[in-house]
Amino acid sequence: MINISCDVLVIGAGIVGISSAYYIKKLNPANNVILVDSGEPMAFTSAQSGENYRNWWPHPVMTAFTDRSIDLMEEIAIETDNLINLNRRGYVLATRSDDIDSLLDELAAGYAESPVSEIRLHESLSSNSYQSPLSGDWEAAPSGVDVLRNPKLIRSIFPNYDKDIRSIVHIRRAGSLSGQQLGQHMLTKFNAAGGKQLKGNVASIEQDDGFRVYLGGYDRVIQAESIVNAAGPFINKIANMLSKELPIKNTLQQKIAFEDSNAMIPRNMPFSIDLDEQFIDWTEEEKALLNEDQDLVWLTQQMSGAIHCRPDGGDNGSWVKLGWAFNETSVKPEMQPALTDTYPEIVLRGAARLNPGLKTYYGRLPRNMHHYGGYYTLTEENWPLIGEMEVSGAYVVGAMSGFGSMAACAGGELCARWVIGLEKPEYAPALSPERHKDSRLMDQLKTLSSRGIL
Ligand SMILES: Cc1cc2nc3c(=O)[nH]c(=O)nc-3n(C[C@H](O)[C@H](O)[C@H](O)COP(=O)(O)OP(=O)(O)OC[C@H]3O[C@@H](n4cnc5c(N)ncnc54)[C@H](O)[C@@H]3O)c2cc1C
C-alpha cells in the first residue's frame, strides 16, 4: 500500500474540480493540493457541455454568482489572448406573445442587484439604440438587456426566425466559450504552480485525523487534511462514503451538433431560445404511428418551451448546435449514459419552429451529426451546492446542472475560499448546503416562476 499525503484532495477533474484545485493553489500557493480522477480530466460531463454562458437568472443570487464567473472568465480571456474563445453574441429569448409582463418582472427581479442591469425597451420600427449582434467580440458587445417589442423590427434584425415572433428579450452579457480550453488552461496553471494530478477511483473514505482516502485498484491511500467532493454526477457516492446524503438528482440531457451545409442559420445569430410550448411538427402519418406506440405517444403531446439553437465553430464555421432539456426523470448516473435514438429528430423538429430553415434537414440529418449527452446534477431549486458537507474539513462543489461550464470559475473560487478559510462573497451562504435550513429562502425560491433550467 502506497501512502501519499496532502493538505487538500480534490476528487474529480471535471471543470468544477479543476477550477477548485486551480483557485485553491492560486489563493494559497503553499497548500499541497492533489487532484484525483478515475478517468482523464474534462472527459465526463464537462466534455458534453453546450459551452454557453449567461448572467440571466430569475434571482439576484444566481445573477451575482454567474456575473462573478463571467468576470473571472474575462480576466482569463485577457490574460490568454482569448484562448478560451469567449464570445458575446448574447442569448435571445423569443416568444409569439405580446404579453411579456411576467418575463419583464422576472428580468427586473433577477437583475435587481446587478451592476450591469440596464434594461432597454425598443418599441418602434427603427431603433438606433439597439446594437445588432454583428460582432461576437465580447469586449465590444454591450451589457444589460434589450427588449424588442415591434415584430417588424424583430423581422428586420432576425429574418431567419418564425415570422410569428412578436417579442424578443436579448440578454447581452451572454454567449459561448470553449470549456475544454478553459479547463486545460486552469489545469496547466495548477500543475505549473506545483499541484499534483493522480489517476484513481476513490473507493472509500475514513475519517481519521483528517481523511484517509482509498483508491480502488491502485493500492494507494491518500492522507488529506481536507477533501473537496467535485465528483459531478457522483457527488452523492462520495458523500455517502462520509455517511452524508446530498439533496440532488441526475437527469440525462442531450444535444446534437451537425454541419449546416445549406447555411440555414446565420453565423452571427445569438444563442436563440424559443420560450413557447409547442406540439412537435410531425406529419399526420408520423403522428398516427407515434400514437400507436405507448412509449412514444408523449411525443404527440404538448412539449415544454426553451428549445435552443446556435451556430457552432465561430464566424467561419458551418456547424450548429441544438438542445432541449425537457427530460425531468431522475436516474442513477452511469459512466456510459445511454442516449435516445429518437432525440436528434425530436430536437431538430422542435428547433425548426423558431428557425423554419431547419426543416430542410427533416429526416436527413447529416451522417456525421454529433449526438451527445450527459447528466444535469441538480437540486430541486437548481442552485449549486458549494461549501462544507456537515463534516469538518469535507467540502462539496457540485450540483452545477446545466450551468457548470459558465459557473466553474466562480464555483471553484468560492470553494477555495471555504477550504482556505478566506472571506467569502455575500452569496456564499445561499449557495452552501446550509441554505436548506433557511426556510424563508427556500420558501421564496418555491415561488419563483422559473428555475433557470435550459
Ligand atoms: C448536454 C449538456 C449540455 C450542457 N450545456 C452547458 C452549457 O451550455 N453551459 C454550461 O455552463 N454548462 C452546461 N452543461 C453543464 C456542465 O457541463 C456541467 O455542469 C459541468 O460539466 C459539471 O462539471 P463537473 O466537474 O461538476 O462534473 P464532471 O465533468 O462530470 O466531472 C466529475 C469528475 O469526477 C470524476 N469522478 C466521479 N467519481 C469519482 C470517484 N469515485 N473517484 C475519482 N473520480 C471520480 C469523474 O470521472 C469526472 O471526471 C451541460 C451539461 C450537459 C450534460
Image (cartoon, rainbow, N blue to C red):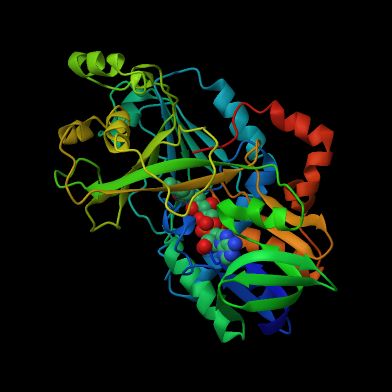
Q: Is residue 108 above or below residue 418?
A: above
Task: Looking at the picture, tell me which residue is in the foreground, 409 or 5.
Answer: 5
Specify whether residue 446 is in view. Answer: yes
Residue name at image x 23 percent, y 17 percent: 289
Residue name at image x 21 percent, y 19 percent: 286
Specify whether residue 72 is in view. Answer: no
**Quadrant of the rendering where the N terminus is positioned:** bottom right
Residue name at image x 31 percent, y 18 percent: 293
How many labels sit on residues?
Answer: 0
Q: Quadrant of residue 295?
A: top left
Residue name at image x 14 percent, y 43 percent: 262
Q: Is residue 160 left or right of residue 245?
A: left
Residue 159, percent from left and from top: 26, 33
Residue 370, percent from left and from top: 28, 50
Q: Quadrant of residue 59?
A: top right
Q: Is residue 231 left or right of residue 388?
A: left
Task: Looking at the picture, tell me which residue is in the foreground, 416 or 102.
Answer: 416
